[in-house]
């Protein structure tokens, strides 16, 4: 099949994505090939999903072994991978329970429902409002698109759900002004990924957590993009000195297969009871088997320290490149600020032509390399990115 033939087949796929004019057909580690045989270094991880790159051998073995035993059963029964993954996650975080979903948006929906039920159980009707942050992104379902604090997403689909309010990130006084007797939770990302790779201020996060504890307002942390080792710790919130009540996750947890989930803390554990929430595919044993291998790999001694070192290595290399104003982010979740007049989308296209895949995040070039990328692969990808940036200098 040629690239043009494949593109023609996509006339049967709804046009909801702006696709690049490439077709990827094979990958191993941080390398992938298109239909024409051109090689790329991948600095995207499928937007943070392929935590261990393409077709990691240990992950692949865990998935295929489970696939030969039991590919699916309903949540009316226990499965070994579902139990093991939950234990691994809770023991590594101090959280008390997990709900499995299929995506980040589903995970955030679950967190929203759990927060409202917690307040309803304890305080009765009328305490249901959730405050999120301006410039946040929490998903594309009706609830999570409403929770998203960006007007660009608040189009076409009116009316939106009631019960959400938005505070300016980093402005504690603005947040306090938005709290009312109806407030049940505050929901935030430690780094606003789709909002432009913008980390939160540690003092602000600590103050928000204290405020929540004082007023029995639940703290929901959205770790869909920042979680599973991406920022140099299992979850990014662990670097902020807080213990959330609910933590949503997805992307890297499945290593390439669809999974989402919510971690429940001391207050919220047991709030969702039989019949109050469910999903058909949540906790799929094949995906959970892969998730177990992902967690075992990234929590092995020295792994996360290497993520931090690789992030610093990239920062140092970028600082010497033409057109770079600075770098934001943590670990291997980085946003490259470009000098005035350079468009991130143009850099992404030029980088692809040079043999490296990167992303945009608003005005920045976003980089989410596989967590186990080698230094040789980093050097090759950075050299290609440097060639691309030189075209705009």
Image (cartoon, rainbow, N blue to C red):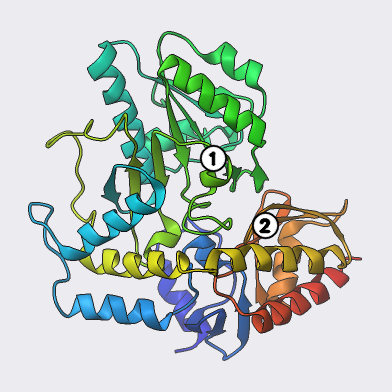
Location of residue 115 in the rendering, given as x and y in whole percent from the top left corner = 34, 27
Q: Mark 1 near mark 2, Cβ–Cβ under 8 Å?
A: no
Q: Is residue 93 visible?
A: yes
Residue under the point 38% across and 37% down: 246
Report the side of 88 relative to 8 (left or right): left
Q: Residues within 10 Å of mark 2 (few under 14, many from 20)?
A: many
Is residue 158 among what the camera can see?
no
Q: Residue at x 88, y 67 (%)?
A: 320
What numbered label is drawn on residue 283? none
Secondary structure beneath disc 2? strand
Q: Does 215 appear above or below 312?
A: above
- The image quadrant of residue 374 is bottom right
For the residues labelled 1 and 2, the Cα–Cα distance comes to 15 Å
Residue 240 in percent (x, y) is at: 58, 40
Q: Earlier in the sequence, mark 1 or mark 2?
A: 1
Q: Is residue 328 above or below residue 85?
A: above
In the image, taking residue 132 as reference, residue 282 lies left or right, namely left
Nearer to me, 8 or 370: 370
Q: Residue 334, which numbered label?
A: 2
């Amino acid at each position: 099949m040629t690239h043009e033939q494949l593109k023609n087949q996509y006339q049967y796929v709804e046009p909801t994505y702006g696709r690049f004019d490439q077709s990827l057909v094979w990958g191993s580690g941080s390398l992938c090939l298109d239909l024409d045989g051109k090689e790329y270094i991948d600095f995207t991880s499928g937007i943070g999903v392929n935590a261990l790159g393409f077709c990691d051998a240990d992950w692949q073995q865990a998935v295929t072994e489970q696939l030969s035993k039991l590919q699916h059963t309903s949540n009316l029964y226990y499965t070994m991978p579902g139990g093991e993954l939950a234990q691994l996650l809770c023991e590594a975080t101090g959280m008390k329970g997990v709900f499995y979903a299929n995506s980040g948006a589903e995970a955030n929906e679950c967190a929203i429902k759990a927060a409202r039920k917690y307040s309803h159980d304890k305080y009765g009707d009328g305490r249901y409002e959730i405050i999120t942050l301006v410039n946040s992104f929490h998903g594309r379902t009706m609830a999570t698109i409403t929770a998203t604090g960006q007007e660009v997403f608040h189009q076409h689909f009116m009316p939106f759900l009631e019960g959400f309010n938005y505070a300016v990130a980093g402005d504690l006084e603005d947040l306090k002004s938005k709290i009312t007797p109806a407030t049940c939770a505050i929901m935030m990302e430690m780094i606003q990924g789709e909002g432009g790779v913008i980390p939160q201020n540690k003092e602000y996060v600590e103050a928000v957590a204290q405020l929540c504890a004082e007023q029995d307002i639940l703290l929901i942390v959205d770790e869909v993009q920042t979680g599973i080792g991406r920022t140099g710790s299992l979850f990014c919130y662990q670097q902020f000195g807080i213990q959330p009540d609910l933590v949503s996750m997805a992307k890297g947890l499945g290593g390439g297969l669809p999974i989402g989930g919510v971690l429940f803390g001391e207050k919220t554990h047991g709030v969702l009871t039989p019949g109050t929430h469910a999903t058909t595919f949540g906790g799929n044993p094949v995906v959970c088997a892969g998730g177990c291998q992902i967690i075992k790999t990234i929590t092995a001694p020295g792994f996360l320290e290497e993520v931090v070192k690789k992030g610093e290595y990239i920062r140092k290399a970028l600082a010497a490149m033409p057109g770079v104003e600075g770098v934001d982010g943590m670990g291997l979740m980085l946003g490259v600020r470009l000098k005035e007049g350079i468009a991130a989308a143009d850099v992404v296209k030029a980088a692809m032509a040079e043999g490296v895949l990167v992303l945009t995040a608003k005005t920045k070039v976003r980089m989410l390399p596989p967590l186990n990328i080698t230094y040789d692969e980093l050097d090759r990808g950075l050299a290609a990115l440097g060639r691309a940036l030189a075209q705009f200098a």
